[in-house]
Amino acid sequence: MSGPVQPTPGLVVGVDIGGSNLRLALADSQGTVLGKWCTSTKSTSSPEMVIVQIEQGVEHLLRRSSVPHSDLMSIAAGVPGVTNSDTGIVIATSYLGGWRNVPFQKILESALNVPAAVENDVRMAAIGEHWKGAARGVNDFVFLAIGTGIAAGIFANGKLVRGAKCTAGEVGYMYVPGTTEEPAKPGAPGSLESMIGGGGIRDQWRNNGETRRSPSATEIFELAATGDLAAKNALDRTAQILAYTVFNIALVLDSALFVLGGGVGMSTALRDATQRVLERYSEPVLPTIVASHLGEDAQLMGAIRLAMTTADARGRIGSGKLIS
């Protein structure tokens, strides 16, 4: 009987920082995941406490894999907020307390003594889908994350689009038919997000006269399949608004593919209903929509890929082409 598979020298760590959970994955120089670690950030979401948790997670993963810290070549972290990946600064996030103009890349490098990279979490998920998921080999696509919030990670001509002020893909603020025309207030959801983010879908349910306990957005979509009228109305309206959003983005970017992710975006009922609406608006393009292949691991896989290219750019390991 053969012994356990030994890790390949030259390891990287990918980090997915969420509003309630922190997830880490250790991978070898080819991107093979060797171990994962998870903890809660609900009561410890400050930058200082998250760094401490990342250090704990990295040491746990290295110890469990029986490899020294010196084998760690780089680390990359996805953060839910406006992030300048060039400077490594998290500019602002509404999901984590105390995060404003945080030089997170520099802090990570100081804490772990390895090269680090920081990216917006949805753009990180797009990197993951482009590398190992539904958009593998597709140079023009949009990863559309729909959960509590709504945002997009955009690839154009094979390159990740960040924008002049690092806000490319903040589509939750879009104004499309069926959404509110009221300007967004500071800290409040944007027009699109207020309608078809998780909270917006529950509001649609309640606005249909429902007085029962409010289910989650995905539960509402499941109820629609049983013939529940309020649920069906919420699903149909959400699909209509999402179809407008996808179609308008497709007109501007001529994207070959839309990958739906996030807890709400992964709903088969929503995807099918949205596709039916899109088929009515097929000129000049009929956007193709698919579900994420990586699911909740999209951001983690993107972080591993970014860590690999970061190590490669610093001459640490040979991991392939640098992500633009």
Image: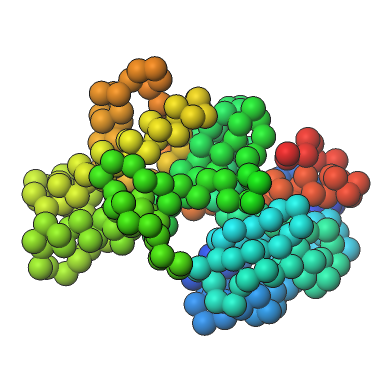
Q: Residue at x 38, y 31 (%)?
A: 247
Q: Is 187 placed left or right of 35 in the picture? A: left
Q: Is 21 placed left or right of 290 in the picture? A: right
Q: Residue at x 59, y 58 (%)?
A: 82
Q: Quadrant of the C terminus?
A: top right
- Residue 313 location (% of width, % of height): 85, 45
Q: Is 245 placed left or right of 317 in the picture? A: left
Residue 111, image quadrant: bottom right
Q: Please tell me whether residue 251 is drawn above or below residue 199 in the rendered image.
A: above
Residue 250, image quadrant: top left
Q: Residue at x 24, y 60 (%)?
A: 202
Q: Residue at x 40, y 26 (%)?
A: 287
The furthest residue to the top: 284
Q: Please tell me whether residue 189 is drawn above or below residue 242 in the rendered image.
A: below
- Residue 286 location (% of width, % of height): 38, 22
- Residue 129 location (% of width, % of height): 56, 40
Q: Is residue 66 visible?
A: no
Foreground residue among 301 and 259:
259
